[in-house]
Amino acid sequence: MKTFQLIYYSKPFGFDLNTLHGILLTSQANNFRDNITGSLLCRADIYLQLLEGPLDKVEEAYKRIKNDDRHIDVKCILKEKTNKRFFPSWAMKDDPVKTWMWTKNEIDGGIIDKLPKSHFLNLFKKVADISN
């Protein structure tokens, strides 16, 4: 079965550690069940997530995310076929965004919509290299 990658971003609604913990627990269980792997990069003003797995399961997960009231303004950045997963052993790798990321002012200024898709793939490759 072909693997797909989907990257999206959203604004957190009611972000705190308990909310993040709940998202991660639910995501890890659902993703394990659905053969989805990936990474969630987050902080109080942004969720940036890579999902990878079977197209139908990735699309179902993305639909759940878009309907989740903990996310505001969910936008897909990239959706494409891939031959290799970045996070093959992570049902959902989380990163508290300590070593990368744009400033809050850059995000508020729309930097994410101005960057090429390759920027986001390279960002997640970097996270994967650190994690693996």
Image (cartoon, helix red, strand yellow):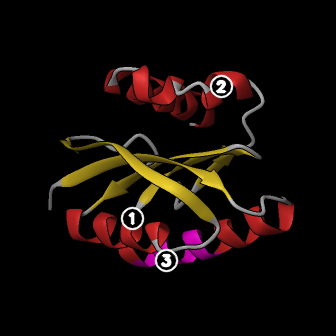
Label 1 element class: helix
- Residue at 59% of width from left, 62% of height from top? 71
- 70 horizontally vs 20: left or right: left
Return the residue at label 2: 101
Which region shows up in magenta?
26-33
Label the magenta part by its dominant secondary structure: helix
- Residue at 23% of width from left, 53% of height from top? 3
- 126 horizontally vs 52: left or right: right
Check disc 2 and give the amino acid type.
Answer: Met
Marks 3 and 2 close (CB-CB < 8 Å): no
Extreme left residue here? 1
Q: What is the C-alpha distance between the residues marked 3 and 2?
A: 27 Å
The reply to whether residue 103 is in sight is no
Instruction: Decide which of tag 3 and tag 2 comes sooner along the chain.
Output: 3
Extreme right residue here? 17
Return the residue at label 1: 62
Give residue 102's mark.
none
Check disc 1 and give the amino acid type.
Answer: Tyr
Return the residue at label 3: 30
Of the two numbered discs 3 and 2 in the rendering, the one whose residue sits closer to the viewer: 2
Quadrant in the rendering for residue 7: top left
Q: What is the C-alpha distance between the residues marked 1 and 3?
A: 12 Å
- Residue at 59% of width from left, 24% of height from top? 109
Where does residue 94 sit, x and y in percent of width and height?
66, 50
The image quadrant where one finds the C terminus is top right
Q: Nearer the viewer, residue 11 or 40?
A: 11
Q: Residues within 10 Å of mark 1 (few under 14, many from 20)?
A: some
Label 3 element class: helix
| Residue 40 in the image: above or below residue 86 | below
Q: Nearer the viewer, residue 111 or 20?
A: 111
Residue 31 colored in magenta in the image: yes
Of the two numbered discs 1 and 3 in the rendering, the one whose residue sits closer to the viewer: 1
